[in-house]
Image (spheres, helix red, strand yellow):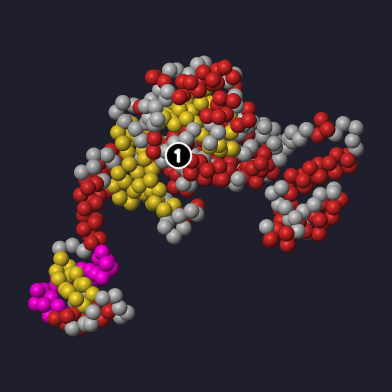
Amino acid sequence: MRIEITCANRVGILQEITHIFTDFRVNVVSGELGGESGDKVYLHVPGLLLAQYRAIEKSLADVPGIRRVRRIGLIPSERRHFELDTLLRHVAEPVLSVDREGRIVAANLAAARAFGVSLDRVPGLQLQRFLPDLQLAELLRDLTAPRYGVPVSVRGRDFLLEWTPILDQESPASIDSLAGAVITLSADPDGSGAETFGELSILWDFGRRREACLQLQEMASLQSPVLVTGERGTGKTTFAGAFHFLSPLASGGRCVRWQCAAGPLPGSGALPDRGTLILDDLDRLSVSDATQLVRVLRDCPAALRLVGTSRSASSLPPALAQLFSSLTLHLPPLRQLRGEVARFASALLKEAGREGLSDTCRPLLMGHDWPGNFAELRDHLTEGVNRCRRRGGERLAPEDLPCPEPVSLTPWQDWGEGMTYRDIMRAVERQLLEEMLQRYPSTRELGARLGLSHTAVANKLRDHGLTAVSSSARQQS
């Protein structure tokens, strides 16, 4: 039997209610508080006899503040559970939820059929078992993972996956706020997933790259054209593809990529009505070609979002610079992420099925400037893996790296001609302090960053004729 008690909100009333059930030696299995006005107490008392209920009802009526006692069929949480279970059973598409470890918590009948197991066996199974190519660990770690229209294959059937994160409401903005996810698999009978942009990958948000990932997450739901800038190999095209898979436009839409150096853009009639159009290397277009491209883009469907890539916004032809002037996302080069190079390398090696790096490799990778950025690092590690495999090793060692010695591309030869070693080092130190002062304007902040006392930093700045912001002036600002 289930009982609903309508009562006033006063201190101690719940304790008086439970004492009555205890006096009658009746076991209350579960209960909850709720109601539209928050004035309801729901109790589940299995095996309660009608005579017992009538006696308890009289005792409850004597408690100050209790206005009504009645029997009900289901308590609200049970009703929500059964209603949701009934709804999911009638949903033709597979729907399931997973926890932070990638275990399936619940699934509907369509998901069990897609996975080829009985419904009662699905909870507790690892999702990776059914989607081995899905980078599940990264999806569960980060909020900037692809979320809509991700093409996957389950037992030979093509689906488009939608990934809805379950966040901890107490700290929704923190990295650890991801408690799990709800997954929906939409059938893809036409194989449109095969035409979708193929460079789908997880964005590693280590170090300063996380700021770009968070900006991506915020911009993905917008409609305006967006420009992704950065050096060669920083992942501009990968981020451009992520704009599609993080956007609701990926539901029922396609992602089409066009390389500006490959030839003219097809007419607007050949483009999809919904989705994302990636325009790679816009800065390589001439002024006349850019003007013609803008004319074509003006006739694109409203539900087709434009995402362009370029080395910088200033290198675009005027017509394109105006079109992509509202939203810009800049990706830092790998040399500005030296502290995280080892983490990026470990993630790349994990993709290749290798254990990781030996500790002696880390300073060598951090000492390199990586002019080709992530593309160069990936090729560098791929060759290292091949050498490690040939010698029968399990972890990459310094002898496996194609270029084991740190190489810096600092252009000292251009401006250091005729200067002594002391003059060159003094110029390098001054340039370093001048650049870092823009980010760490006080001597204490700069000293903490360089591992020096603020007095030593102040002496160096005075020696080079540089000035830091005083603590009092910084507090006033």
Viewed as shown, does residue 254 lie left or right of 107?
Answer: right
For the point 31% across and 36% down, the residue is: 186
SS of the residue at dot 1?
Answer: loop
Viewed as shown, does residue 465 lie left or right of 73?
Answer: right
In the displayed structure, 435 sits above or below 7; it is: above
For the point 20% across and 43% down, the residue is: 90
Judge whether residue 126 can be spotted in this image.
no
> Where is residue 422, by image quadrant?
top right
In the displayed structure, 330 sits above or below 207; it is: above
Residue closest to the eye, 433 or 203: 433
Counting from the top left corner in percent of width and height, residue 343 is at 59, 44
Viewed as shown, does residue 11 lie left or right of 470?
Answer: left
Q: Which residue is mark 1?
A: 222
In the displayed structure, 37 sits above or below 374; it is: below
Q: Is residue 31 magenta?
A: yes
In the displayed structure, 429 sits above or below 289; it is: below
For the point 52% across and 16% down, the residue is: 263
Q: In which quadrant of the rendered image does the N terminus lie? A: bottom left
Q: Is residue 113 magenta?
A: no
Counting from the top left corner in percent of width and height, residue 260 is at 54, 21
- Name the amino acid, label 1: Leu
> Where is residue 299, by image quadrant?
top left
Counting from the top left corner in percent of width and height, residue 28 is at 22, 72
Neighbourhood count class around disc 1 (C-alpha, 10 Å): few under 14, some 14–19, many 20 upward: some
Residue range (magenta): 30-57
Judge whether residue 442 can be spotted in this image.
yes
Q: In which quadrant of the rendered image does the C terminus lie? A: bottom right
Residue closest to the eye, 191 or 440: 440
For the point 73% across and 62% down, the residue is: 472
Counting from the top left corner in percent of width and height, residue 137 is at 46, 45
